[in-house]
Amino acid sequence: MDTTNISADLVEQIVRKIVLECIGIPGKAEPNPAPELVVSISARHIHLSDADVETLFGPGYKLTVEKDLYQPGFYAAKETLMVVGPRKRMLPSVRILGPTRKQSQVELAFTDGISLGIPLPVRQSGDLKGTPGCVLVGPKGVVELKSGVIRAERHVHMHPTEAEYYGVNDKDHMNLRVYSGPCTTTFENVLVRVDKGVHLEVHLDTDEGNACDIDHADKIELYK
Ligand SMILES: [Zn+2]
């Protein structure tokens, strides 16, 4: 390439532009600020179908909102159920999360699975083929789930703009490093779930959250 026709002025302009872009000039386009990262423990819970709500609580029954969750549209219900595993081992009071969905699903930590005698497969929410079942006991009835008991795969919810910030796509996997003194831990294989209607939030279960002492973390990093 013949560069003899490029003037010193033009070179200076180009260099200036690149330097300014690199350092980020106040008042000009700043690099995107890091989105606020929230890490939450998703404690054991149950999602129910409308039909199972009616079987367990009576015809026409609707769940009662006790507390809205961080993700818009989702809530912890006032209602709880008893979860019974094989040989009558049970958890007496497991919270229901709303709204209702197509198929009932029980999300437990490995420790819960050991208590109940149910070996838990690690699955993405809704991927229930071939999973174990359990019995749900409510005030007005009993439902025997043939499948639907899982340990939810650790995951991060994010909006498409946040996925762009991190340079990831739906179903990619990321790493989460939690700095908490002697309990500092890196979680690999954090599943990315991109959706328009969500806030940036990592969901760990109680086993994972306790292992890294998330309540006392002083720094958290999410990276590819
Ligand atoms: Zn989640």
Image (cartoon, grey):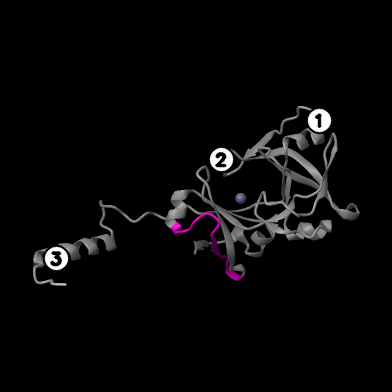
Which mark is first along the chain, 3 or 2? 3
| Image-based side of 165 in relation to 72, left or right | left
- Does residue 58 belong to the magenta stretch? no
Question: Measuring 76% from the left and 41% from the top, which residue is drawn there?
Answer: 80
Q: Looking at the rendered structure, which numbered label has been put on residue 134? A: none
Q: Quadrant of residue 210?
A: bottom right
| Image-based side of 65 in relation to 195, left or right | right
Span of residues in magenta: 166-182
Amino acid type of the residue tagged 3 in the rendering: Glu
* Element at label 1: loop
Q: Which residue is mark 3?
A: 12
Q: Which residue is mark 1?
A: 58
Mark 1 and mark 3: span between their CA atoms?
A: 77 Å
Q: Position of residue 151 (x, y in %)?
A: 71, 56
Which mark is first along the chain, 3 or 1? 3
Pick the residue in front: 213 or 131: 131
Amino acid type of the residue tagged 1 in the rendering: Gly
Spot the residue most to the top.
60
Q: Position of residue 134 (x, y in %)?
A: 82, 49
Q: Is mark 2 within 8 Å of ligand 1?
A: no
Amino acid type of the residue tagged 2 in the rendering: Pro
The 10 Å Cα crowd at callout 3, few under 14, some 14 to 19, many 20 or more, is: few
Pick the residue in front: 42 or 10: 10
Q: Which residue is mark 2?
A: 72
* Element at label 3: helix
Pick the residue in front: 170 or 63: 170
